Amino acid sequence: MIYVSLSLFYVEPSMKQQLQFHGRDGTLEVEFRAFSDIEVRGIRQGERSLQRLDVPAALWGDAERNRVWSIFEKQTAGARQFIDAIIADEPLTPNFYDGLKVQQVIDAALESDRTVCTVSLV
């Protein structure tokens, strides 16, 4: 079983987001700081403290490593993206159907964990 928590902190003059993934064998934390970089830390069962982990180069794509938030400067996000789609009379993706499909995958994963069986998505 994997448990996920998301935190969002706003402290002048920057913002911090933190994702935590807790599993049977350890914990993985990902911290984003506004106008700064990303820090990934992990700890395995039996270890005493979190260790900083490097993000593999292949996962960065064209994002600037020293300015993780720059990815949001290249595209609209959230409410602005929704409003832009309405003004342009264009469909928005991901849409509610995409959200439904993601929820079905999550539900299947939870059911598979609960029953210790493969769950079909067909």
Image (cartoon, helix red, strand yellow):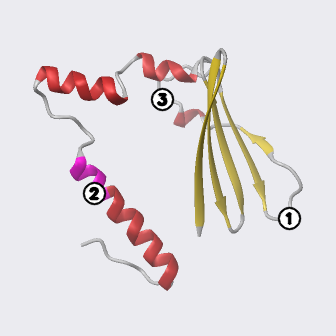
Q: Nearer the viewer, mark 2 or mark 1?
A: 2
Give the residue displayed 65% in from the left and 36% down from the top.
Answer: 31
Query: What secondary structure is found at the residue carrying circle 2?
Result: helix
Q: Is residue 4 magenta?
A: no
- Which quadrant of the rendered structure holds the N terminus? bottom right
The boundaries of the magenta stretch are 96-101
Residue 6 position (above or below residue 77): below
Q: Are marks 2 and 1 in contact (CB under 8 Å)?
A: no
Q: Position of residue 122 (x, y in %)?
A: 24, 72
Q: Quadrant of residue 21?
A: bottom right
Q: Nearer the viewer, mark 3 or mark 1?
A: 1
Query: What secondary structure is found at the residue carrying circle 3?
Result: loop
Sequence-earlier tag: 2 or 3: 3
User: Which disc is residue 46 wearing?
Assistant: 1
Query: Is 52 on the left or on the right of 72, as rendered?
Result: right
Give how far apart the Cα atoms at labels 2 and 1 are.
38 Å
Residue situated in front as seen by the camera: 2 or 87: 87
For badge 3, the amino acid type reads Gly
Sequence-earlier tag: 3 or 1: 1
Residue that extends furthest to the right in the rendered view of this protein: 48
Residue 64 position (above or below residue 96): above
Q: Which residue is mark 3?
A: 61
Give the residue displayed 67% in from the left and 17% down from the top.
Answer: 12
Give the residue displayed 31% in from the left and 23% down from the top.
Answer: 80
